[in-house]
Amino acid sequence: MNTRTRNKYDTILIYLFITGNEHLIPAEIRNSIPYSTQATWRGYASEKYIGNTLRYMFDEGIRTANLHNKHKNIKPFLKAMENIYVTMATILDTIKLPLYQVKAHRQTIIDLIQLHGPTVGLDKLIAYFRISKTTYHNWLLDVKVKCSASYFELCT
């Protein structure tokens, strides 16, 4: 005798269909669920289920999973851009600019390092601009602290 058994699905699958987040389910699992079952689950009203007020516990996890899926290619892209920059900077290092031309842009360099330092890292940015840590701190003082030659005036 050939008996047919019904498939049993985890409740998280049903929940993801009810909330419209079925794209978070891996494709091989999603494709194994019959279309009619998926359509039925999409039509369920989550408010009719007992305990639906506890749904907020899962919503944060679903938001995090959505963000992860949406932005999972950002890190490899930024790593590639960093690699390209390091390669180009090494090539352009063969062309040495006169020191006065580099010093003319120290305000811009200091502003960029301060803006992106917390994200990229201070040591890495200083290395990108091919300046020493001492030079960075000296330029920072020159750019940010304005002092006159008078002993009686305060620095700004």
Image (cartoon, rainbow, N blue to C red):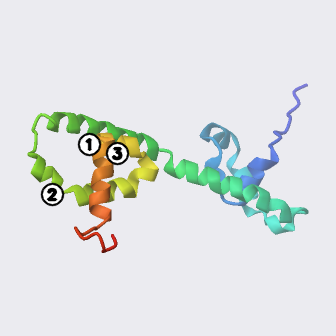
Mark number displayed over residue 104 = 2
Q: Residue at x 34, y 53 (%)?
A: 113
Q: Nearer the viewer, residue 119 or 9?
A: 119
Query: Left of 131 or right of it: where is 25?
Result: right
Instruction: Identify the element where label 3 is drawn.
Output: helix
Q: Is residue 7 above or below residue 57?
A: above
User: Which residue corresponds to the image point at 63% horizontal and 50% vertical from the top-left?
Assistant: 65
Residue that appears at 22% across and 56% down? 106
Residue at which label 3 appears? 125
Instruction: Find the distance from the CA under tag 3 to the CA under tag 1.
Output: 9 Å
N-terminal label among 3 and 1? 3
Foreground disc of the pair 3, 1:
1
User: Nearest the camera: 126 or 12?
Assistant: 126
Q: Tell whether label 1 touches label 2 (CB within 8 Å).
A: no
Q: CA distance from mark 2 to mark 1?
A: 14 Å
Q: Could you say where residue 132 lies in the image, as x and y percent from the top left?
A: 29, 41
Q: Where's residue 68, x and y in %?
A: 57, 49
Under mark 1, the amino acid is Ile
Give x and y (percent) for residue 153: 30, 74
Residue type beneath disc 3:
Leu
- Give the mark, 2 or 3, whose residue is nearer the N terminus: 2
Name the residue beneath numbered marker 1: 131
Q: Which quadrant is home to the N terminus?
A: top right
